[in-house]
Amino acid sequence: MPEYDINSTPIISVSHLGKWYGDFPALVDVSLDVSKGQKIVLCGPSGSGKSTLIRCIARLEDHQEGTLFVVDKERQSGKAASERLNGQVGMVFQHFNLFPHLTVLENCTLAPRLVKKLSEQDAEAIAIKHLEKVKIGEKATCYPPQLSGGQQQRAAIARALCMNPTVLLFDEPTSALDPEMVSEVLDTMVSLAEEGVTMICVTHEMGFAKRVADLVVFMADGKIVEVSKPQEFFAAPQHPRAQLFVRQISGH
Amino acid sequence: MSATFVAHPSTVPVQERRPPEAPSALSVIGTELFGSWPRIIGTAIFAVPIAYLVWWVLDWTFLESVWRADDVEQCKVAVGACWSVIAARFRIILFGLYPYDDQWRSALASLVIVVVAFLSCLPACWTARRVIVCWVAGFAAYLLLMYGGVFGLAKVTTDRWGGLSLTLFVFSAQTVIGMPLAILLMIGRRSHIFVIAKLSAGLIDLLRAIPLLAILFTAAVVAPLALPEMLQGDKLTRVVIGYALFFAAYQAEIIRGGMQGVSEGQAEAARVLGLGKWQSLFYISLPQAFHKALPATVSQFAIAFKETSIITIVGFFDILASGQAAYGAGEWYPYFKEVYIFIGMIYFITVFSLSRYGAYLERRTKNARI
Ligand SMILES: Nc1ncnc2c1ncn2[C@@H]1O[C@H](COP(=O)(O)OP(=O)(O)OP(=O)(O)O)[C@@H](O)[C@H]1O
Ligand SMILES: [Mg+2]
């Protein structure tokens, strides 16, 4: 089944990553390679360091130890704040973080125009293509607060896609949504996965993980404690923490 | 009736239901004023003095008033307002001591400022380039007309500028110079570079700790003693810069307050998309900060307009001081009320327009609900 090539050089290579908040170790010796086209689901109990890891990869946080390769480039520790990013690593946030003073269309065209220097027409054409793909083409001229949560999150996905990212990071994209809107966002993510978009996704949606993930990475206390195929992970987790976690999210 | 509670599915089709008729505004007011005996009595108690006051104002302002410029004799016997003082002396109020024959220049210059201010309030004008072009051209035209010395216009030094014309200039120049300064100070204060952050914070706190009067005195009187001749410039220039610094210190804190209301996630999203620090600031954070700070900003502009009158303390004749000069000369002395009412109306129109404009901006962005 895997459409990705495990032998190619990984797009993201995290090795022996360490990160502290003050004296508190948020990431301890974390190593993870992601190849092109691979879908990783990251899960674990609250406070286990999932967001921290994904934010380190996005360069929103600095790591202090180990090495980090993201899309052909080694990212130095201690330099995250001053590094100019280029949209190659797309990120979808739990709280959408759409720009409320811009229309949905402007949200999608701003970065392509400013960063990629696309003309207004080109940027709009791309934006409309992606907005239609996530099925909110008719909301292009609305402001984000006029949209439902699910629509906002899909707009945020479209905004990330407009930069044509090499990899997409999702940090609990459905956990701020009302239950009836979760599936529309997950469906969008499934179709992206089927197109072969590389993604790392923090989520507790078991159905989604089983359907699209190549690997489930389970974290606890800032460490990766288990890596396995989704079917195996949810059916027979090995580590006691993972067993507890699977029991809890399955509602038993 | 027994207290049984029944729940059953609604059987009426939704389409057939209309909301109950809302009462009209008139009937609401009617009920509020005359809905019950205590209300009728209350209304009567207040209506009589209010009606009397309104009648008295109308009578004084219009019915018994004198309007023509050469009617000073009639003013002495009339019970109403003596608007003749305005007709006779309005040039002093508008232009101060500006040479009589050249006052058309002062009028035209004021018009330029008003037009440019109006233009830069239009959303169509809101690109950095357009705003800069508008105001550079506007101030150039103002200074050229007022100062003269070229194109056959006689030179009129700034000590003779005055009236509404001067007030408009001091107000627009202090805000147009002060606003970019405010943004700079705000950026400085939020800087990660320790020295810049502390310097900006120190400057803001210092400027806010000194009374405006002291700043103006320093600019007008002390600065020439301290600065070398070539840096001194004109007294009016120094005073306007003093005003601008004072405005900038307060406005910087207002914008900073707005920035604190913009969530961290906004800048993070901008950064991940590839926007640079400055792009993120000017396209994402600042517009939202300004929106949040709009009510306070409008107040700051209103305060700035009214505080232009303090400029008399350093020897300039703004509209208020010119008004004093207008009735101060002999025969018009008793009619100072009319002069102050006239000037009050000008202040009111300006500040009221400002607050209406603020309300328009809020309505304009209400969909965005920033
Ligand atoms: N800015 C910060 N300052 C101090 N400690 C932090 C900070 N951010 C996160 N932490 C701590 O680091 C640990 C890992 O946090 P992280 O947000 O990565 O967890 P998470 O796995 O994403 O949890 P959740 O499922 O609740 O989102 C937590 O114990 C948290 O308290
Ligand atoms: Mg998290």
Image (spheres, grey):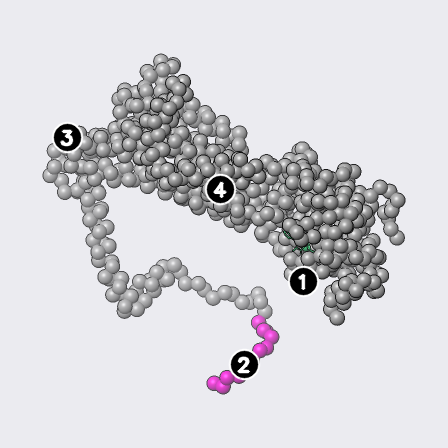
Q: Are marks 1 and 2 on the same chain?
A: no
Position of residue B224 in the picture relative to residue A63 (left or right): left
Using a 10 Å C-alpha cutoff, classify the residue at mark 2 as few (fewer than 14 neighbours), some (14 to 19) or many (20 or more). few
Position of residue A88 relative to residue B12, above or below, is above
Quarter of the picture for ligand 2?
bottom right
Q: Element under label 4?
A: helix
Q: In the displayed orientation, state which residue is furthest to the top.
A: B152
Mark before the other along the chain sequence, 4 or 3: 4
Tag 2 or tag 3, which sits nearer the N-term?
Answer: 2
Q: Amino acid at mark 4?
A: Ile
Visible residue check, residue B202: yes
Name which residue lies at 85% across and 61% down.
A232
Residue marked by disc 1:
A179
Gap between marks 1 and 4, in whole Å?
38 Å
Residue depicted at x 80% and y 49%: A32
Within 10 Å of the Cα at label 4, are there few (<14), some (14-19), or many (20+) other Cα atoms?
Answer: many
